[in-house]
Structures are given as structure tokens and as C-alpha cells.
Image: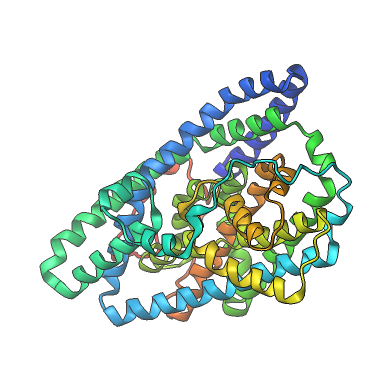
Amino acid sequence: MKFNLTARIVLGMLLGICTGYYCHATFPDPQAAKEVGSYFSLIAELFLRLIKMIIAPLVFSTLVVGVAKIGDVKSVGRIGVRTLGWFLAASFVSLLLGTLIANWLKPGATLGLPLPAVTASTGLSANALSLKEFVVHLVPRSITEAMASNEILQIVVFAGFFSIALATLGDKAKGVVDLLNQISHVMLKVTGYVMALAPIAVFAAIANVVTTQGLSVLLTYGRFMGEFYGGLLTLWLMLTFAGYLFIGKRVFSLIKYIRTPMLLGFSTASSESAYPKTLEQLERFGVPNRIASFVLPIGYSFNLDGTMMYCTFATLFIAQAYRIHLSFLQQASMLAILMLTSKGMAAVPRASLVVIAATLGQFNIPEAGLLLIMGVDPFLDMGRTVTNVLGNAVASVVVAKWEGELGESVSGEDLGVGIKDIGIVTISPEQPHSV
């Protein structure tokens, strides 16, 4: 039986949990545990840096080639409107679901832990989330600066203008399109090499979290985390059902295809780490490259379903912990605020916590309440990330279906990229669904 990438990632997670538990027990002093965990963190950080190294050229080349292949500016606009329409609907459902679950289960009311002083500092700054800053941040001052900083939304904006210009030039731009197509070949080849290291990075990331946090924190916050993951499970079912409405039983095959990037996103708590593999698996599933490479980068800024559900859930959790009642109108206002501020999250470090901090300030809820969840946030971030991956994959498939371009799946026993699989990573105009 072939030991594919998915199996190796699962093994890495299990070994990481065992190793982290042993290290946490061996080094009970928090400072010593943090120092040991930093060595594991170094390995995970190196992997994430490798991922970040390829994200900008991969996003730019695949997006430009994809839009250029569409050829018609009107078609690009139609796909863009459909994509944003789906994202807005998914965002609203995610935010509403987090609100409903928090109101129903009231996780903050039964916390039973000492509350931080209202004057305690969280070390977070919500200044970057103003509407003015977000709009200005959309347009890059320099494309090289945007690529150097991995500002995906800015890269998407520049690539949009660049690709539309290529499409209007027709045959005159053929040489540029061919060059970028070859660059995308190279970047996908590099992606294969990087993905072969994923199990090691997963092991290190999990070992670091368990070494520094321990497993006891899961017991202390067991109910809160259980209720949040129950909400995520509900959102997964809703996303799966939405996919079922458009592509029928093939949605279950889609989940099988993206199980590797979902596991990768869960274990590293990084959407960026899952991006290259998600793009590849969507094309294997039958989503044309020109659609997948268009929808996915935008989704990383506008369609973070798991993160948006967490924003409403955590905000109400903190309000309940401090016994602050929010009326129906206040909660409706909170949803409206989060619909706007959440769209700028891709450009903000520790985005979800910063968004929550900004929202708390709008309703006079102590920002210090964030200290209640910071300890378990790495575990919660895993669930948010895997939900974001699923949401963007479903969105890509639905848009392809709307365009009437969803093709057949590429068969194969191993849907992961292993060392033996690296040589098959290809993109060609004649076979747009194979990667």
C-alpha cells in the first residue's frame, strides 16, 4: 500500500502530539518548555518561509495566465461578480452561525475562570482595521513591495489589471502569456519539492504547540473549544450541503481530493501552507486553472469562513464572561461591522484577534477579555484554517459549475504529492484540468 502524503501528515501529527506531551512533562517550567518548543518552531517556521517564498510568483503567474486564457473582459467581470457574490453570502452565513451558536450555548456564562482586569493589555493594535486603511491598502505602492511582503490581495489587484491588459492585446501579448505559463510550470514543480517536506513541518508545528501549551489547557477550556468545534462542524455540513446543491454527490469526492490541504492547513494553522496543494487538487477535481487561480487568491482575503464565525462566537463569549448583554440591534450592528472589517484581515498580523479587539471596542466590552482565549487560540486557529480551506474549495467548484466549465476528475490512488509524484506536476492549455 502506498504511503501517500495524507498518511505521512497524519503520522507527523500523531508523533508531534506524543513528542510534545513528553517534552511538556519533562520540562514543567513554562520558560524551559517555551525554549524547547522554539526548536520545533524553527523547523515549522522554515517550512512556512518556503511556502511564502513560492506564494507570490505562484499566485501572480497562475492568475494572470488564467485570466488571459478567459480572453474576454466581460467574462472576467462576470466570474468576478459571481465569486464576490458567493463570498458575501458565505461570509454572512458564517458570521450569523457564530452568533446563533454563542447565543444558544452561552459559553462565556459558564466559564468558571478568573476574569482578567479590564485594564489589562493584550498587546494588540486594531488601528489597521479602519475602512480607510483597508481601501488604501488594496492598491500596492509597488508590485515588488507587495510580492516581497506576500500581500496576496495587492498582488491580485495588480494581476487583475495586468491580465486584462494582456487579454485586450490579443496575439501581441502571446509571448508574455507563454512566459508566465512556463513560470507557473516551474513554480508548481518547486511546490512539489516543498510539499514533500510537509510531514516534517506538521510534526514540528504540533510538537511546538503541545510542548508550550500542554494538553491540560484543552481540559480547562474543553467546553468552550468543544462548542466552537461543534459550530465549525455545523459550518462544514452547511458548506458541503451548499456544494451538494450545485454538483450533487461529487461534493463528497471533492472533500476526498482536498483532504491533504485541509490536513496541512489544520496542522500548521496556516492557510498559505495549504494554498499550493489546494490549487493543484482543485484542478485534479476538474476546476479549470483559469477559474481556480482566479477564485482562490481572492478567497484568501474575502472568504475566510472559519475565521469569521470565530469572530462573532469569540466576541459574544467575552461579552458573556463579563456579563455584558448585547441587544438584538447591537448584535445586528456587530454583524454589519464584521462584514466590513473582516475583509481586511489578510493584511493584518494575528488577524482574527485584532478584528475581535476592534469589535470589542465598538461595544464597550473589555479588550482584556481576549486574554481568556489567547492560550487556546493556536488550537482554535487549526479549526478556523481547515474551514477556510474547505470554504474556498467549495467556492471555486461552484463558480466553475456556474460557468459551465467544471470538468471530470483526474483519477489516481494517491492524491497527495510525494517524492515520486513531483515529476507529474504539469499545466498545459490542451489539458487545463490536469496538474
Is 140 placed left or right of 124 in the picture? left
Query: Is 57 or 311 nearer to us in this picture?
Result: 311
The reply to whether residue 250 is visible in this rendering is: no
Residue 107 position (above or below residue 200): below
The reply to whether residue 43 is visible in this rendering is: yes
Query: Is 118 or 424 nearer to us in this picture?
Result: 118
Colour scheme of the picture: rainbow
Q: Residue at x 52, y 71 (%)?
A: 87
**Residue farthest front in this picture:** 119
Query: Is 163 or 71 nearer to us in this picture?
Result: 163
Image-quadrant location for residue 189 = top left
Quarter in which the C terminus is drawn:
bottom left
Quarter in which the N terminus is drawn:
top right
The percent position of residue 360, horizontal first and vertical second, equals: 66, 58
The percent position of residue 429, horizontal first and vertical second, equals: 28, 65
Number of disc labels: 0
The percent position of residue 414, horizontal first and vertical second, equals: 54, 49
Is 36 placed left or right of 408 in the picture? right
Q: Residue at x 67, y 18 (%)?
A: 32
Residue 30 position (above or below residue 202): above
The percent position of residue 31, horizontal first and vertical second, equals: 67, 20
Is 217 placed left or right of 196 in the picture? right
Q: Residue at x 85, y 62 (%)?
A: 105
Q: Residue at x 57, y 76 (%)?
A: 89
Query: Is 262 or 348 nearer to us in this picture?
Result: 348
